[in-house]
Amino acid sequence: MLDAANNAVTSAKSDVTVAVVGSPANATAWVKRANRIDLARVDEPGLRMWCYEDGLPFRDEESRARLLAITGGWMKALAHARQLATAKGAAVNSGKLLKDVKTWLTSGDGRKLVAEAGVGPANPVLAETFLSVANLVGPDGENTWSLVELLKLDKDRVDLERLATEAGFDSLDDVVTALSALGCLTDAATGRLRPEPTLAELVLNGAGGSTT
């Protein structure tokens, strides 16, 4: 599909732009694309605008920071917060909504977010690699080279290099790149990679459904 899109752009008589939306399932096809645009999780400025436009009761920085911390900026969780706010009406307060969103995440519905993020059972190499990262990497994170070497040492639990090869990735480095592109790995304050906290908490509490 990506090759077809490139051919369409090349053969077009006028300037055209073709966007192809990928998914975690076909990460091997897009992970090395230089012109890839990563669809990141919602950040604080985006959340502020979203809350304002949708009239959500997160009007101050503190409540938005708590919403961002609980949801991780994942759109599935934020969309659920919006659904709850709409159902409860104008009288609902942010504290009650935050409790309800947390309850939703820690229930079986948290598995839906894990699956949508790309680290559910349908994507074994992404799921197992993220689980290893969540188990092994602290809040300060690791640089990419150190992270890959650390993952290789987790062979007693699962052979991630073998899984990567079987899934069609050229290397474990590409799996880490894919997880970063999907928003599952974030830049720590040090500029190094660490697991996204909301997703890591869900996976470590059993919402990931490890394939091993």
Image (spheres, rainbow, N blue to C red):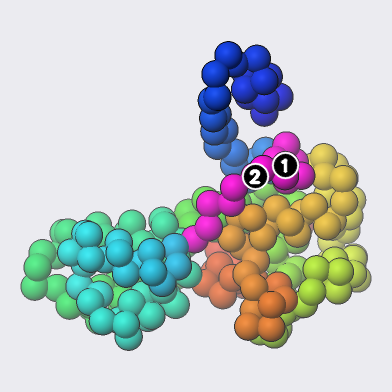
Residue farthest to the front? 14
- Give the camera-side residue of 210 and 135: 135
**Distance of mark 2 from mark 1, alpha carbons?**
5 Å
Q: In the displayed structure, does residue 177 sit left or right of residue 120? A: right
Indicate the position of residue 187 as horizontal and vertical percent values.
Answer: 64, 73
Which picture quadrant has residue 70?
Answer: bottom left
Indicate whether 34 appears above or below 20.
Answer: below
Location of the N terminus by quadrant is top right
Indicate the position of residue 76 as horizontal and vertical percent values.
Answer: 41, 56
Mark 2 = which residue?
Answer: 36
> Bounds of the magenta span?
28-41
Q: Are marks 2 and 1 in contact (CB under 8 Å)?
A: yes
Indicate the position of residue 25 as horizontal and vertical percent values.
Answer: 65, 41
Q: In the displayed structure, does residue 131 sit left or right of residue 86? A: right
Mark 1 = which residue?
Answer: 33
Tag 2's secondary structure? loop
